[in-house]
Amino acid sequence: MIYQDDTITLQTGVPGYDSIGVEIIAWSPSATVIGDAQPYNKEKAYKEYGLTAENEMKRVFTPANVAWVEGAQCLLNAVSYRILKVLAWDNHYEVLIERVS
């Protein structure tokens, strides 16, 4: 069962340049979804999926009709996270995200 008590804002990145000419990606909101975000162990992420992460990780469960994109970003409680892995199941997605430092 997905409790769906967390609001997650998916973001789309647009490449550009800052005021001194350094290439940046500007992230803007693209969709808002309700899901269940839980803390996730970095060692478990490596063991189960071969993922390495340096920062805090979370595992998010959402309905299957959400357009998650690996490598993009999302906001959870006003904190930016990078989308590392999207796993599609029969009726939901399991998504691993890492806090952006």
Image (cartoon, rainbow, N blue to C red):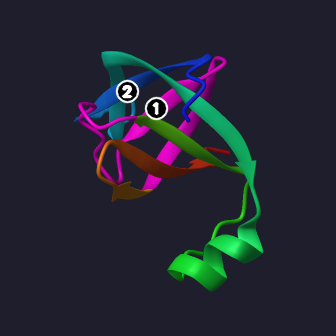
Residue type at numbered disc 1: Cys
Does residue 67 belong to the magenta stretch? yes
Mark 2 touches mark 1? (CB < 8 Å): yes
Magenta stretch? 63-84
The answer to which image quadrant residue 73 occupies is top left
Vertical comparison of 42 with 25: above or below? below
The answer to which image quadrant residue 15 occupies is top left
- Measured as percent of width and height from the top left, residue 82 is found at 49, 46
Q: Nearer the viewer, residue 52 or 8?
A: 8
Residue type at numbered disc 2: Leu
> Which residue does the image show at 36% across and 40% down from the upper left?
24
Q: Is residue 22 visible?
A: no
Indicate which disc residue 10 carries: 2
The answer to which image quadrant residue 31 occupies is top left
> Which residue does the image show at 37% across and 59% down from the upper left?
87
Local SS, label 1: strand
Which residue position holds label 1?
Answer: 74
Q: CA distance from mark 2 to mark 1?
A: 4 Å
Q: Earlier in the sequence, mark 2 or mark 1?
A: 2
- Measured as percent of width and height from the top left, residue 29 is found at 34, 16
Q: Nearer the viewer, residue 58 or 19?
A: 58
> Looking at the rendering, in which quadrant would you find the N terminus?
top right
Instruction: Give the tally of numbered discs.
Output: 2
